[in-house]
Amino acid sequence: MNNQPYFIIDFDSTFTKVEGLDELANIALAGNANQEKIVGEIRKLTEMGMNGEISFSEALSRRIDLLKANRSHIDKLIDFLHTKVSNSFQRNEKFLREYADNIFIVSGGFKEFIVPIVTAMGLKEENVYANDFKFDNEGNIIGVNEDNVLAHEKGKVKLLSSLKLDGDVYAIGDGYTDYELRASGLANRFYAFTENVEREKVVAKADHVVPSLDEFLYLNKLPRSQSYPKSRIKVLLLENVHPVAVESFKFEGFDVEFHKGAMDEDELAEKIKGVSILGLRSKTNVTKKVLENADKLMIIGAFCIGTNQVDLKTSTEKGIAVFNAPYSNTRSVVELAVGEMIMLIRNVFSKSIGMHAGKWDKSANNSFEVRGKKLGLIGYGHIGTQLSVIGEALGMEVYFYDIVDKMPIGNAKKCRSLDEVLKVADVVSMHIDGRKDNTNIFGKREFELMKKGVIFLNLARGHVVDVPALVEAIKEGKVAGAGVDVFPYEPKTNNEEFINELRGLPNVILTPHIGGSTEEAQEGIGHYVPERLLEFMNNGSTTGSVNFPELQLPLLKNSHRLLHIHKNVPGILAKINNIFAKHAININGQYLKTNEKIGYVIMDVEKGYTDEFIQEIKDIEETIKFRMLY
Ligand SMILES: NC(=O)C1=CN([C@@H]2O[C@H](COP(=O)(O)OP(=O)(O)OC[C@H]3O[C@@H](n4cnc5c(N)ncnc54)[C@H](O)[C@@H]3O)[C@@H](O)[C@H]2O)C=CC1
Ligand SMILES: O=C(O)CCC(=O)C(=O)O
């Protein structure tokens, strides 16, 4: 390719995520009692060679001696390596194919497994420079072809020198031997590739550190799959969201920071600077103060149902889209409520505590079945309705109250007021959302209205119940048993003590806000939320957003997509269209949706627009946020 630089790309841990020889050892030694030990030694030698701590040739020959592999193992390795091509190389296969003439794989690895992998991605076999194995008659690997310059000290430098490339040469790799190409003067620049491994010694020598191939292509203005490299976009994930979520963001190449615990306001207000995507669960409050510092924030993903922990008003005003997972953990909450209801009405929990203290109390006193009892549901949404169905299946009579007129499921009876439910129910279960208006809606008066000996469950939100009033009702015997999963104040991490007046009361099941914490629910949420966030990032779609107008957009094809978020006042679309007309820009597609606060307009256009045009769109007074995708 004329006037384009040459790209010298390393294979192991750069083109692929793994070191080929290490993996070959793993395959060859499968079932060997010393597998772990030998593979460990091989990995150590690989690392020492990569860091320049021992010579490359020494590292290579010592590893081959340990290997004990044959041709059939290489075939298995090839199958495995096809699945281990680095994510950003997979994303940019088009670039690899288009620039194949200028791309050389120069590796201390082995052609036998490198050629099938890189040619499958469009590279040329004749541009692969790597070692070759020596085999015996049975196909066992017995050594390295010593005639190959790459089997020796400074092999890559000697090889590159022999290629006599005329023009700029950029070396990309994760190892010290890749840097040596630059040190020798044969390469103009060395890019330390850190998507898979980051070696301090190598990074220190680099002209640029590239966390992905996208970053390399962006720096060099080359065609790429990501208009703006995702490695430059920071994702902050809090509260131990499921590993599949972390993986989804990493797979796309984002710069991901993960924390097990929640953060308090001051900590988050600092940490949020520079973050574009924030993921959290129920314990991190995204307050106005946090949002004021959120200079780059585009999306908040609540990996749960409730979004009361997020200041939605300010988020919307700042053009930050908020998403949640409205369904994935509902069944888990329902199952916990059912279990608790049975344990409490039967007095099992207290009996179990007694047994642990050596007390044998075989009696039926104050132990009841749920069958035939009246289940009162406050809030008849996703959770309330599921519990209604299961309650009926257990033989309970279901009564519910919801502020919205809801259709009863099965034989459930709709009540016209909260009081109506409270007066009849043997079990009262709260499933309302945590909006501000619901603060302390359950207090002294509500407990007084209930039947004596009622079972009370709160798996909704801590602040909806006045805890001292509940404590009093339990002590007075009005409430015979309670299951509480949520509290007005909840510890931020597992290391913080739980302090609450409900501690120590009889027949009270306390759980640490785990209604939605099952493997199934968390994995479901871990898939669901990143999918919504990535749809918004990559395509602009807002399906499932709790504060943005919902737009499901077609995939972007052969166009550039401009996304404009503005205050919802009359005349903005006209202003935008006037700018298009002034610059004579053809619109391939335009989508607009508004809510009471903001308007969200998307325009797909041809590539031929000027910076001036973009600036004019951004300069529209009511613009809140502007973004481009291509
Ligand atoms: N403990 C845990 O781990 C979990 C707790 N939750 C909590 O459960 C809540 C309910 O979840 P879903 O059923 O999925 O939500 P949902 O939004 O489907 O249902 C909530 C229902 O409550 C009703 N409602 C709100 N305020 C009310 C009031 N004052 N009186 C009567 N009805 C009222 C709403 O109209 C709605 O129908 C969530 O908002 C969340 O706070 C959800 C999942 C897990
Ligand atoms: O899993 C969590 O941290 C919170 C669950 C919850 O309360 C919700 O989904 O609203």
Image (cartoon, helix red, strand yellow):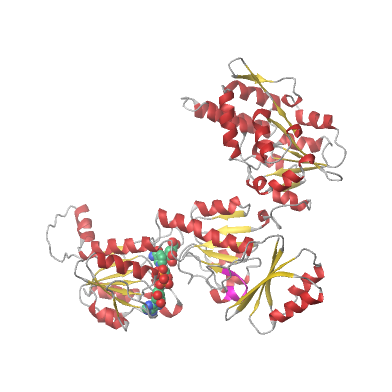
Residue 392, image x, y percentages: 26, 68
Q: How many marks?
A: 0
Nearer to us in this view, 43 or 613: 613
The residue located at (56%, 31%) in the rendering is: 76
Q: Is residue 608 above or below residue 111?
A: below
**Residue at figure coordinates x 73%, y 70% from the top left:** 587
516 relative to 40 in the view: left or right: left
Instruction: Give the position of the C terminus as an image quadrant.
Output: bottom right
Question: Is residue 172 placed above or below 361 in the rendered structure?
Answer: above
Q: Position of residue 545 (x, y in %)?
A: 54, 69
- In the picture, measured across the screen, residue 557 lies left or right of residue 449, that is right
Residue 195 shown in magenta = no
Q: Locate residue 473, reporting x and y percent.
A: 26, 75
- Give coordinates of residue 338: x percent, y percent: 29, 63
At horizontal 55% and vertical 51% (from top left) the residue drawn is 247
Magenta-drawn segment = 314-321
Residue lying at the far top of the rendered structure:
137
The answer, for residue 192, to whether it is visible in the render is: yes
Question: In the drawing, does residue 493 fall left or right of residue 468?
Answer: right
Using the rendered image of the protein, determine whether residue 271 is visible from the camera's viewpoint: no
Pick the front one: 183 or 498 = 183
| x 74%, y 23%: residue | 148
Tell me where residue 431 sits by quadrant: bottom left
State which quarter of the image contains the N terminus.
Answer: top right
Ligand 2 placement by image quarter: bottom left
Q: Quadrant of residue 458?
A: bottom left
The part of the image, by quadrant, that contains residue 330 is bottom left
Q: Is residue 539 left or right of residue 456?
A: right
